[in-house]
Structure formats: C-alpha cells, structure tokens
Image (tube, coloured by chain):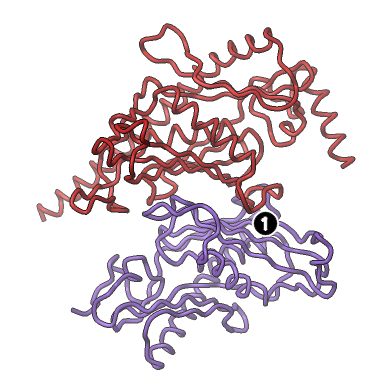
Amino acid sequence: MAGYKVTRKNIMEAISKGKRLNGRGLFEQRPIEIKFGISNKAEGSVSVKFGKTEVVCGIKMDVSEPYPDHEDEGTMITSMELLPLASPEFEYGMPSIEAVEIARIVDRGIRESGFIDFKKLCIKEGEKVWSIFIDLATINDDGNLIDASALAAVLALLIARKPVYDKKKERVSYGEFTDEKLPLNIEKMPLTITFFKIGEKVFIDPTREEENATEGRLTVELSKPESEKSELINAMQKGGESPFSIKEIENIVEEATKMFKKLKVLVDGEIEKFEKEKTEKSEGKKSKRKEKVEE
Amino acid sequence: MTYKERFDKRDFKEMRPIDAKIGVVPNADGSAMFSFGDTIALASVYGPKTLTPKHMQNPEKGILRVHYTMLSFSVGERAKPGASRRSQEISKVTEWALSPVVRLDELPGTVIDIHIVIPQANAGTRCAGINAAAMALAHAGIPMTEMISAVSVGKIDDKICVDLIKEEEDYEEGEGATDMPVAYLSNSGKLTLLQLDGRISTEKFEEALEAGKDACKKIFELQKKVLKEYK
C-alpha cells in the first residue's frame, strides 16, 4: 500500500506541473494501434491498443423479435467483459459495475448519434428484425478502457458485413457472410473522449496507475453530421466523486471537439486502408481464379 | 464415399500451420499465444501468489487453477459470455494436463491462476490453450519439470487425422468422426490429457496415439524455439 501512495503522489505532482511521469503531455494520446479481423467467425472484429491497453470487439448478428414499442426497428446489445486474463484486478462472476458502465457508455454514444439505421434492420415488421451484438473484452488493462472500447465498437461496426439469412428456414446461416455492410449513417459516427481529473488538472488517456490516482472523470461522446455546423454531443457521463465546475466542463467540451477531429482523421485513415487492402485481396483472388481458368 | 482427401487438402497426419508468441499480455507474470491455423488461444499466468482465504491454502503444495473462456464472437453462432458446462470441463482437464509438470511442492500455500481465452475458434481450442498455457508458465518462470504439448487427433471415416477442423469433427459419412485430444510430456512421453468421442477400434486407437505423439514433438520444437528466442 505504501508503494501505491508514493506512486499516486508522484503522479499528482507531475500532473500539477502539466506533465506526466514519463513526459507525455496532458492531452497527448498514447499511440493507437488497430488490427482488423481478429476473429473470422465475427461479422466484424478488431483489436484496439492504446499503448499497453488492449481491447477487442466482435460484432455478431442474429434474427429475433422486435421490441413491442419499436416494431419496425432492429435491436442492439452491447456487453463488456473485464477478462481476468487482462489484469490481476479482474475477477470471474457477474459483470462488475465497471464492466456494465463501460458497455452502457459505449451503447449510448452509438444509439443516440443515429450511427445505426435501426429501421433498415427490420425484416418483417412486428415479427423479425436483425439484432446486433457488440461484444467487448479486455486483453490487457493499462487504463482508459472506456475510450478504447468505444473506438473498438465503432471500428468493428464499420467493417462488419451481414451474415446470410436463410429466408425459408427463417434463421441465420452462421459462418456464411454476405458482402452487405450494416446500415450505418457514417457521417453520424460517434467518437468518445474521456477526461480525467486530479486536483485542478484535467487530462486524457491515463495509464492504469494514473487512472487509479484520479478523483473524477467526464466522458464526452460527439458526432459531426453533415447537416450540422459543428459537433453534437450525443452522450456524456460524469464518473468519480470529484465535482466539476461549469468552466471546467466548458473547457472539456471544447478540448473534446479538438480531440474528435484528430480521432476522426485516424478512423477515416484506418478504414480507408482496410477497404483498400480488402479490394486488393479480392482482386488478387479474382486474377488468380482467372489464371486458373485460362490454364 | 470415403474420406479420401481432407477438406483443406492437408495430408492426413499433417497439422495446420502452427504459430506461437510470448508476452501477449503485458500485465501478466507470463503469457503466450498459440495457434493451429485459424484456431487461436491466448493464455496468461498470474502467480504464484498467496492464496486467500487462508483456509483454502494447502500447506504442502501450491494450487493450480485454470479458467478457459471462449469469446462470444469466436464461433459462428454467438456464444453466451461466461462459464458453460463445456468450458468448466475443459478448464478442469487442462488443469490436470498441466499440473503434473509444475513443481507445486516448491510453492506451498500459493496459487497460480492460468487464464485461457479463445478469440477465434475452428476446433482444437483446448489443445491450443494447453500449448499456450504451458508456454505462459515457462515465461512466468514457474518451476517445471518438462514441457507439455497437445494436439487433437481423430478418425474421420476410416482415416487417422491429426489436428481436426470443425468440418471434420462434424463429418457424418462412413464411420463418422472420432475426436481425441491428447497432451504429451516432452521428456517422459507420458500423456496428461486424453479424451475421446466417437467409435474407434483398439488398433486404430493405437495408431491415433502414435500420430498424436509425432505431432506433439513438432509442437514441442516450436514451443522450445519461441521460448528460447524471447528476450
């Protein structure tokens, strides 16, 4: 425990001077590493690394009955597993409140932004609709699981393709995929940035040690639809015991819009790269097939 | 119709390409990835650490606990997160497969937790998990007497096959499918995992055991190489 207190004190001292222990700036994000297609059984899957933090996300789809109050809309369920594989602090059993909160924050950003067109997920009104499962899990925890999870969910949705639906049997042919993407409003893509607070200082993307030393956090989920002049706030969550002043919140929102723009460039770039590699692969296959035919 | 050629064109006693990597979970005391083709297992080791509550401790020797989990999106139809009867059984047989080589007598009062996670599955996940876990134990510096290597062998129709894929496990023509995961110790050549589902003659069973042994030697070579090269 003594070691923990010293670390916390050191972190606080450094942050109060506007820097972290390793010299990283307060609004400087750790390197983000993205790997698509970590499970070929998923409709879409991705691994997202923020430094040593690694979160994986897989999209699975099924066909089910709609909710009675939304008979012409598909459904979405987001879940998060804090796997004990990833940290000595995580345990088996019922999902912890931490896991539940992360899943709910991710869910709200996606739902409220209108990123998914749920009406287009209707197969037969009142009877059959597509349900989307967004399943998140930790591989290694080194802090800021909320933002890594939110980014992983959006990326996995962006590359997901629908499975084959057998109309006669009225069920999904598992393991068979169409080329059809999910009905997304790409321009409404939500991105999530969480701000953490120690003393009077606010910063982003903490390591686990830093995050444990914080007293409060504020998550901001933004999107920038074409019809809007500037970013919209789609969801927020204040966590932890420390209160925030209006001034602090205004500064955070302003900083969040800057982070949003940077993050959007990164996501657009990664998706473009993914699509390009996919096209090259399929063209490669096609030309190989052609060669075979010509032989 | 007999099973003349494997679905993926491999030789009957040929494994899928195998791959392994150390240090995939930085938080853990030891960790590794092992894959048979598109079947991937991650394993992390935490410990040895003092076991609490105290009354669960064994003053004579340490305790090894294995937890096997498939991610919900590792299979075609979404698997419900959390423990199933299947995953509980696999955790237990994996524990029995690994514990004989761990010098638990040197670690009284402690526990070693091994977590196996399957992100992508195409049969053979318990064997990939054992291979990854054995490497993760070595990476964690846990005292071990020898290495463990595991592979699934089986009989598809009348052919002895090594490292079955899902399509083979589901084969129904002819004599159908017999699935037999095995784990061998690297030095003594003894078995620490043996399960079997299907129908197989005693002669064919012996042939399958031999095929599994040969494959495990190759797996051991890779495990050794990757552990030696890790810095």
* Subunit that carries the residue with mark 1: B
Q: Residues within 10 Å of mark 1 (few under 14, many from 20)?
A: many
Residue at 48%, 43% in the rendered image: A135
> Which of the pair A191/A27 is nearer the observer?
A191
Residue B180 percent coordinates (x, y): 44, 78
Residue A155 percent coordinates (x, y): 43, 34
Residue furthest front as drawn: A68
- Is A172 on the left or on the right of B112, as rendered? left
Residue at 52%, 32% in the rendered image: A106
For the residue labelled by badge 1, is the local secondary structure a helix, a strand or a loop?
A: strand
Which image quadrant for residue B205? bottom left
Residue at 48%, 42% in the rendered image: A57
Chain given the colour red: A
Residue A230 percent coordinates (x, y): 46, 8
Q: Circle 1 sits on which residue? A: B30
Which image quadrant for residue A37? top left
Chain B on-screen colour = purple
Residue A38 percent coordinates (x, y): 44, 47
Q: Is residue B207 above or below residue A39?
A: below
Question: Count the marks: how many?
Answer: 1
Amino acid type of disc 1?
Answer: Gly
Which image quadrant for residue A268? top left
> Which of the pair B101/A5 is nearer the observer?
A5
Residue furthest bottom as drawn: B203
Residue at 49%, 32% in the rendered image: A107
Q: Is residue A277 above or below residue B127?
A: above
Residue furthest left as drawn: A294
Q: Is residue B182 above or below residue A280?
A: below
